Image (tube, rainbow, N blue to C red):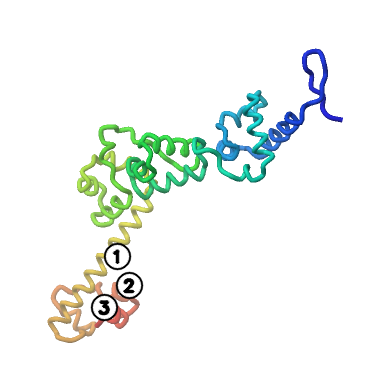
Amino acid sequence: MGRLVETGSALSRPSPEDRLFHILASRLRKKVKNKVDVLEASSRFGVNPSTIYKILEGRAVSFSLKKKLIAHFQDSKATKRPGPHRVVSVEKLNQVFRLFQREGTLAAVARRLGVTRERVRQFMTQGSQLGLFKYQGLKRKPFRRHSVAKEKLLRDYKAYRHLHRVADVNRIPFKFLHELLTLYGVTREQLRSLRVAARQARIKEQLISRYRRARKRLGYNPTIWELSKQSGYRRRDYQRIASIWGSVRAFRKKIGH
């Protein structure tokens, strides 16, 4: 027998719509466990997240909303389609964040999406609140116009190896540079790796340059003993060549000699 619903002083059977809505609410409570799930459900059914919260808490929703939810629930195809554009999906928020990482500024993302900068900021803030990614709005308003892309900051750091120099080159305050690096998720380990890579590249260039100068003076490929006698050549160079290229022969082959 169906569940009885009390209306005034009389008892009546629940309507088919009430039964369907009860099933829908039960399934939502089983599946929705966090804010991300709420956003996904609101996008799936084409309603605001507040409506999903009402259902989860057992609060009443309007008759028109109930009909809309039941229609989506009954139509298996409709439940798989994203809701209206006014409901932002998790996929959309992640897309905005990926664009922000690539473009470097809210304004650049806004131009790409055809929306306002403020709307992009709202997307970023909402995604951060949901735990999808980490976004900290820049608090120093006077310097917001000095936005620099993440790739340029890392490229400059690899070239100069000092954050103060990077700040000077990009004409931004040192403190603001730290805010940008935090915003982009750049870690100390990443900076250290860039320094090591830059140092190794510099050593390679020096070794090749000194070897070519010695070869030019002698007119042929010098031996290790001959290299050691050349002006400007260092004792450690042979050890470095062996460490980086494996042997002098491999080194010569690499530089085309």
The residue at the far bottom in this view is 220
- Based on the displayed image, in which of its 4 quarters is residue 30 positioned? top right
**Where residue 97 appears, x then y in whole percent?**
42, 45
- Based on the displayed image, in which of its 4 quarters is residue 70 positioned? top right
- Crowding at dot 3, Cα within 10 Å, few <14 / some 14-19 / many 20+, comes out as few
Residue depicted at 35% across the width and 57% down the height: 193
Q: How far apart are marks 1 and 3 (CA)?
A: 16 Å
Do residues under tags 2 and 1 come within 8 Å of each other at their CB atoms?
yes
**Where residue 174 appears, x then y in whole percent?**
25, 41
- Amino acid type, label 2: Ile
Query: Is tag 2's residue or tag 3's residue first in the polypeptide sequence?
Result: 2
Query: Is tag 2's residue or tag 1's residue first in the polypeptide sequence?
Result: 1
Residue depicted at 69% across the width and 35% down the height: 24
- Quarter placement of the N terminus: top right
**Camera-side residue: 79 or 27?**
79
Residue to which mark 1 is pinned: 200
Above or below, 105 relative to 202: above
Mark linked to residue 244:
2
Residue to which mark 3 is pinned: 255
What element does badge 1 sit on?
helix
In the picture provided, is 61 more to the left or to the right than 18? left
- Amino acid type, label 1: Gln
Do residues under tags 1 and 3 come within 8 Å of each other at their CB atoms?
no
Nearer mark to the viewer, of 2 and 3: 3
**Camera-side residue: 67 or 130?**
67
What element does badge 3 sit on?
loop
